[in-house]
Amino acid sequence: MDHEKSTSCCCVLDASTYVGFWILKKLLSRGYSVHAAIRKNGENEIEEKIREMEATEERLVVYDVDVLDYQSILVSLKTCNAVFCCLDSPEGYDLWHALAKMLSEKAAWALAMDRRLNMVSINPGLIVGPSVAQHNARPTMSYLKGAAQMYENGVLAYVDVKFLADVHIKAFEDVSACGRYFCFNQIVNTEEEALKLVESLSPLIPMPPRYENEMQGSEVYEERLRNNKLSKLVEAGSAC
């Protein structure tokens, strides 16, 4: 095991979210120690898995935090070299989720610049992956509310959660990483790709009846997204 990683500790807040859990798993697999900060919002299946992991994984410590209690967060950050912030919106606030994330990121950038902290923001497309319909239903449905228009405009993109977790860790490990990254590894611009996406999100959204037995359609929308900056980070270095 790499000695630098074995002595490096990262905090994942909130580790019981879908993305947070995968970042936690990837960090542990790479030899990092992890503080899993779990928001006090009621137990879910992911939280139960994390607590089971804590019993057998010596490099994992679980902390219960209140995001409105600064001191409880500070406790979870003690001895950590980095924090991966993966907070979801509380139950019943989905309509304000996008605005809240935008404003909180804006405030975070202001604080980071004021205090000369190294901050990187990873902004993913629609997140897909194992059991996403079960463990990430609300954020997924919130994102899909604008999916039809994004599809027609050539900007409907998605990213596998494992790749997304790898990108987060790459941004931490690469000292030249900076600024904001739009993270996706697939653009949906054909009817066939759209239907495959629908299948992957079942049962959150049903397959249109006329496509239940056969995928068809030839209309192609022009891709209007690029992630050159992300590609440079993943392949080698990064560019500001």
Image: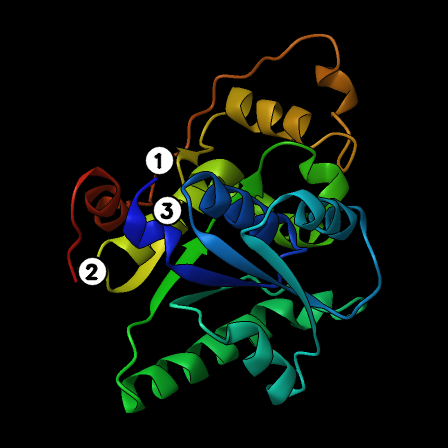
Can residue 155 be seen from the camera position used here?
no
Residue drawn at point x = 52 percent, y = 24 percent: 193
- Name the foreground residue: 24 vs 214: 24
Query: How many numbered callouts?
Result: 3
Q: Give the label on residue 222, or none.
A: 1
| Among numbered discs 2 and 3, the one appearing first in the sequence | 3
Q: Which residue is mark 2?
A: 175
Above or below for 77 versus 15: below
Q: Residue furthest right?
A: 42
Residue drawn at point x = 23 percent, y = 47 percent: 233
Above or below for 111 versus 195: below
Above or below for 7 versus 39: above
Left or right relative to 42: residue 202: left
Residue drawn at point x = 58 percent, y = 73 percent: 76
Q: Give the secondary structure at mark 2.
A: loop
Can residue 148 be seen from the camera position used here?
yes
Above or below for 61 versus 56: below
| Among numbered discs 3 and 1, the one appearing first in the sequence | 3
Q: Give the label on residue 167, or none.
A: 3
Name the amino acid, label 3: Val
Residue 204 appears at what percent x and percent y?
77, 37
Mark 3 or 1: in front is 3
| Among numbered discs 2 and 1, the one appearing first in the sequence | 2
Name the amino acid, label 2: Val
Distance from label 2 to label 1 (Cα)? 35 Å
Q: Residue furthest top?
A: 213
Q: Residues within 10 Å of mark 3 (few under 14, many from 20)?
A: many
Distance from label 2 to label 3 (Cα)? 13 Å
Residue 72 appears at what percent x and percent y?
65, 82
Q: Quadrant of the N terminus?
A: top left
Q: Residues within 10 Å of mark 2 (few under 14, many from 20)?
A: few
